Image (cartoon, helix red, strand yellow):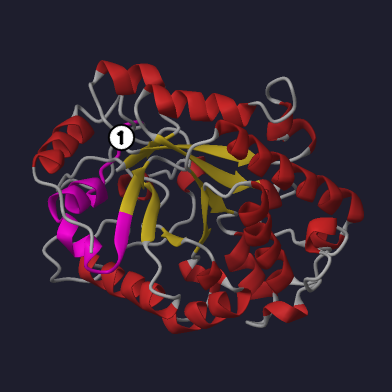
Amino acid sequence: MGVGSQPNSTIISQGLKPDILDQYLVGAGNGDWTTWNSPAGAYVGVVASNAQQVGAIPMYTLYQMATNGDGNLADLNDSTFMTRYWANIKLLYQQIAAYGKPAIVNLEPDFWGYAELQSNQNPTTLTALVTLNPDCASLSNDIVGLAGCLVKMARQYAPKAYVGFPISDWGGNSAAQVVTFMSKVGAQSADFIVTMTLDRDAGCFEVSPLPSECSRGGTGYYWDETNQTSPTFSEHLARVEQYQSGLGNLPVIWWQTPMGVPSSTPGGTPGHYRDNREDYFLKHPSELTAVGGLAVVFGAGASNQTTLATDGGQYQALSTAYLSSPAPLP
């Protein structure tokens, strides 16, 4: 079990024992994570120190490809951007190596979904400046080479790092299509795959008017925990099993899983929108391990969602109960 973007003070005050502590590494320019601390890249050590303080493994969610907007892939062929990109990747891995202990790296959420959509399911048609990086001069200048370079550099510079590619359900028309694309990319050469349920509390999409952070519209965000009426948890787990079996049977990490509290009343209020994913996952852990589940990282992908400070002690109670009888890994 892990948590993301939660202050250590809250974790410690509640007596929590997360296995993973997740933080974003974002952008370039003014948002360049390498400039957040001095010397350059020291933020990696800050995250590692925070994780160590609560007995957790640091997890770094690399989100640099969205620097100039989600889905803007023009930077792939911009030499200035890609030179800086590869330098930051190298620095990340070098800092993890300096930490000297295991770490987890989640490689570019959402990016692979946009790449799938914009490459017409063929990653070799989406060019990228890969060989300008001397560490990857033998790889191809496309998305396949990009993915391969991310893994190759991890093995070269940070042998204690575990890296994985996140799956974007929406990148293809079916789970099988997404598996085919990610196989071509080479996701199976990593150490794990990353999947998601929803990056906000379900209730945030049910209030009117919709908050700006939940303005996607649509319905069916709150799943049926009895698994009788679609959308259900069983349906989600079946998709995850397809991803896992189709990508080398790699272990699965659920990431950015919402922390809302179950309710029969749709909606909620900021910081208290309803959701039932945390409740279901921690009460049915063997269903996750049955489809290759290794870990679940709980957290929010936007402001005003439920956190450890606003969940009324739900995570504290559920995690304590789970740890009293954890699900054995395969």
Q: Is residue 207 visible?
A: no
Depth check, front residue: 189 or 66: 189
Q: Which residues are drawn in magenta?
A: 271-294
x, y (%) of residue 286? 16, 60
Residue 225 part of the magenta segment? no
Q: Is residue 69 above or below residue 74?
A: above
Q: Is residue 43 above or below residue 81?
A: above
* Residue of label 1: 18
x, y (%) of residue 191? 48, 61
Q: Is residue 3 left or right of residue 137?
A: left
Depth check, front residue: 97 or 184: 97
Depth check, front residue: 134 or 119: 134
Residue at image x 62%, y 53%?
154
Residue 280 part of the magenta segment? yes
Residue at image x 31%, y 46%?
203
Residue at image x 86%, y 62%?
77
Q: Give the image quarter of residue 57.
A: top left
x, y (%) of residue 226? 11, 63
Depth check, front residue: 109 or 201: 109
Secondary structure type for disc 1? loop
Q: Is residue 72 left or right of residue 218?
A: right
Q: Quadrant of the C terminus?
A: bottom left
* Mark count: 1
Q: Is residue 146 left or right of residue 302?
A: right
Residue at image x 72%, y 65%?
146
x, y (%) of residue 222? 27, 56
Q: Give the image quarter of residue 45.
A: top right
Q: Is residue 9 above or below residue 256?
A: above
Q: Is residue 35 above or below residue 143?
A: above
Q: Is residue 35 visible?
A: yes
**Residue type for callout 1:** Pro
